[in-house]
Amino acid sequence: MSAVLIIPVVIGGFLLLLILWAFGLYNALVRARNAVRNAWSQIDVQLKRRHDLIPNLVETVKGYMQHERETLESVTSARTAAMNASGVAESGRAEGMLTGALKSLFALSENYPDLKANQNFLALQEELTSTENKIAFSRQAYNDATMFYNNRTEVVPSTIIAGMFHFQPAEFFEIEVPAEREAPKVDFSDKSK
Amino acid sequence: MWELIRANRRKSVCLVIIMAVLLFAAGFVAGEALFGPGAGVLGLGIAFVIWLILTLVAFFEGKDLFMKVSGAHKIEKKNHPRLFNIVEEMSIASQLPAMPDIYIIRSQAPNAFATGRKPEVSAIAVTSALLNQLTRDELQGVIAHEIAHVKNRDILFMTMIGVMMGAIVLLSDVTVRTLFWGGGHTRSRTSSRDGGGQVQAVLMIVGLILLILAPILAQIIYLAASRKREYLADASAAQFTRYPEGLASALEKIADSSVKMKKANRVTAPMYIVNPLKGGARGRRASSSSLFSTHPPVRERIKILRSMAGGSSYLSYDQAYRKITGSSSPVLPRSARSTPDEPARKPSKKPIPVPVPVPIPTPAGKGKAPLDAVGVAALTGASVATGAAAPPEPETLSGKVRETTDALWKSKNYRFVNCDCGAILKVPATFRRPKVKCLRCSRTHRLEPLARGAAER
């Protein structure tokens, strides 16, 4: 009699454990996917912050660098282009151009001692450098999160759950690399390398 | 990254359980020894209550407590934009859920530490000397190391283990002292009944030896965990910044400074990035790692970071660690080592020349609260209970307990008065009268008025 009882109990217990384990896998997948989404929105936040800082910078610099009209204009137009860009590929390219334009602006500012003594300019420079870093770090965090999530969707036990509930692999953020290489060629006298 | 934390957590839980067993064993023996046979359960209860109280205090006051003891002031973005930006950058790189609060300690010794019981509520403190001496890249490395502590939940873990260690030390100290001075039940029991008495006496002695060893064992566990976590935080810092050289040269600068932290004591020492109590790494002792050091030797940490061979991942840190230390066991959990390598980045092109000036907010009032005037040195002195006979011996465990409890008193704005008879009076902030009488020798002392800000709290 006891044997009759034991078998269903063992099977039931085993099934219960299996289900709990599947819950765990599912939850881990959801957590990883949300981390990817969160990291993506971080990039957006930082890009927007850079757009917001640029008018201030141009305003501050204008008085000192009157002979560098072109550079200033290229920064402004790169900003406009970046703000209007849509789609990952296009905005990646536009942001890369903006990065290049800012770089050459700061490089030129070395020739203006008055400007370099301006507190406002120094503060803006720190802000923009930091924003630049934050963009890089949020991209890095996004890629870390993406790799972790993609691994989750591909390794054996959790790939079953991922397939059942349609967890799509996320894309790595790589577009900016070729765009950054292009940027100096497009607009400016070639300084880098 | 997440798996690193999980593997960590598993190990931490094991350590916490070992500590808990040690604590309750100590409680049981203490009960048997103090209140006679059969009272072990009572001792167990007492051990639990002590632990609970200490844990609650550490949990809810931990952050403020550490900051207060270290003399740190909270700053806003406008006080030091660059520091603020770097912390923000590292929060992003480590995917911390919330930005930590930032504190500055005015000190000539470059150092930094982090506190907070969970990643959502954390704080990072750096000294003013650190800000002045490090470049942006180096500062970034230091901050990344601190954020790694927050991210890996090292602080919660170290606080929990630290609290248990404190409770064990307290229990063993009280019991041993009481028995030594003739209290307790063991002596009368053993003399009254001869036959069973002897067995009991032997058991008691074994128990007491255990009780004396428990604090030492607890400390060894605590410090071993602390050292391992330093390596881990270094590895994470390299991973977050993708630039191990930044942290390496920062560590070098910090280690080469021969200035000691005035406000650091042995309780807070494990929290700093480099042990603040040693006067620089040039001394012979600092270069060797012992069972009783809070941090791995700095030179070794620098060497590991430098030999990561252009990589920045946990894997290359692990390889470098094994090469430098000659150890065959990995320092990081296996799951962490499977992350693909990524080349370390170049140093940032050109350091921004002029740092924006730092107006650090001073506390309201006279600038220095009377509590500060007492200083940490006084904390190791005699107290009313033990009297002048006890020499100020910082290396004893009871000295450590006193330091912890005194830190608690100070955080509640108690004033400390050193009496000539050797007693230290602890005067609560609510005590408004200008004079106080010593409880032992009846000498009268004038009290310094409280700083205005402090009296309100």
Image: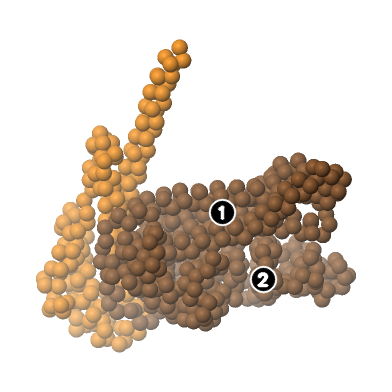
Residue most extreme to the top: A1
Res B248 label = none
The span from disc 2 to disc 1 (Cα, nearest Å) is: 23 Å
Classify the position of the N terminus of chain A by image quarter.
top left
Q: Is residue A114 above or below residue A135?
A: below
The residue shown at (15%, 58%) is: A90
Question: What color is chain B drawn in?
Answer: brown
The subunit letter for the residue under badge 1 reads B
The subunit letter for the residue under badge 2 reads B
The residue shown at (55%, 59%) is: B222
Graded by Cα atoms within 10 Å as few (under 14), some (14 to 19) or many (20 or more), the crowding at tag 2 reads some
The residue shown at (37%, 35%) is: A21
Task: Give the letter of the orange chain.
Answer: A
Image coords of residue B221 (percent x, y) = 55, 58
Graded by Cα atoms within 10 Å as few (under 14), some (14 to 19) or many (20 or more), the crowding at tag 1 reads many
Q: Earlier in the sequence, mark 2 or mark 1?
A: 1
Circle count: 2
Res B394 label = 2
Amino acid carrying label 2: it is Pro
Contact check, label 2 and label 1, Cβ < 8 Å = no
Res B160 label = 1
Image coords of residue B248 (percent x, y) = 38, 74
Q: Closer to the observer: label 2 or label 1?
A: 2
